[in-house]
Image (tube, rainbow, N blue to C red):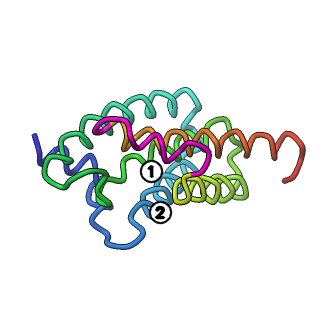
Amino acid sequence: MIKISKIVATICGIGYIKKGSGTVAAIMYCIIWFLLPQFSDVAQIFLLILILIAGVLSATEVEKIWGEDNYRVVIDEVAGMIIALLFIPREIKYVLAALALFRFFDILKPLGIKKMERLPVGWGVMADDVLAGIYSLVILHLAIAIKLF
């Protein structure tokens, strides 16, 4: 079970990259999302639910060997990017804006994001990125609505 949890938590090994593994995981999801135009919003929501469940379970499991919120766990970045890209027009400028906003919120952890890490085990690992994704989504939708792009 621990081997499967490592594969899931690291998104097939991306988490083993020493520097910037979270950014790489987020970029990989952006590329997949952008290149699959048939990937509907409904499919993304379904994927998000699966990623959230798998993320909580795998992060909880690998925490036993790697410690709390280890850098190798990057499934949370994928969950955050899924949220940041929900209902966004499939244009490169929006993908780049979503990525920049998400990484800003994920790295700096303002507005209560840091507090989410206090949740127990895998919940805390996933929750801060979920909130970072929500903030990114809201800001990007507001920017689109007021025609900043």
Disc 2 marks which amino acid? Thr
> Residue at the location (26% across, 60% down)?
13
Side (left or right) of 110 relative to 52 = right
Eyeballing the image, is 24 above or below 54? Answer: below
Along the polypeptide, which appears first: circle 1 or circle 2?
2
Q: Which mark is residue 35?
A: none
Q: What residue is shown with label 1? A: 77
Residue 1 image position (x, y, % from top left): 10, 40
Residue 83 image position (x, y, % from top left): 56, 39
Task: Report the front residue among 83 and 135.
Answer: 135
> Residue at the location (36% across, 53% down)?
74
Cα separation, mark 1 vs mark 2, equals: 8 Å
Residue 102 image position (x, y, % from top left): 58, 52
Task: Report the front residue among 70 and 80.
Answer: 70
Q: What residue is shown with label 2? A: 23
Disc 1 marks which amino acid? Glu
Residue most extreme to the bottom: 19
The count of marks equals 2
Side (left or right) of 48 relative to 18 = right
Magenta-span inclusion, residue 118: yes
Q: Is mark 1 on a helix, strand or loop?
A: helix
Residue 12 image position (x, y, % from top left): 27, 55
> Residue at the location (37% across, 36% down)?
119
- Start and end of the magenta stretch? 110-122
Side (left or right) of 147 relative to 92 = right
> Residue at the location (26% across, 46% down)?
8
Magenta-span inclusion, residue 96: no
Eyeballing the image, is 42 above or below 131? Answer: above
Q: Is mark 2 on a helix, strand or loop?
A: helix
| Circles 1 and 2 in contact, beta carbons < 8 Å | yes
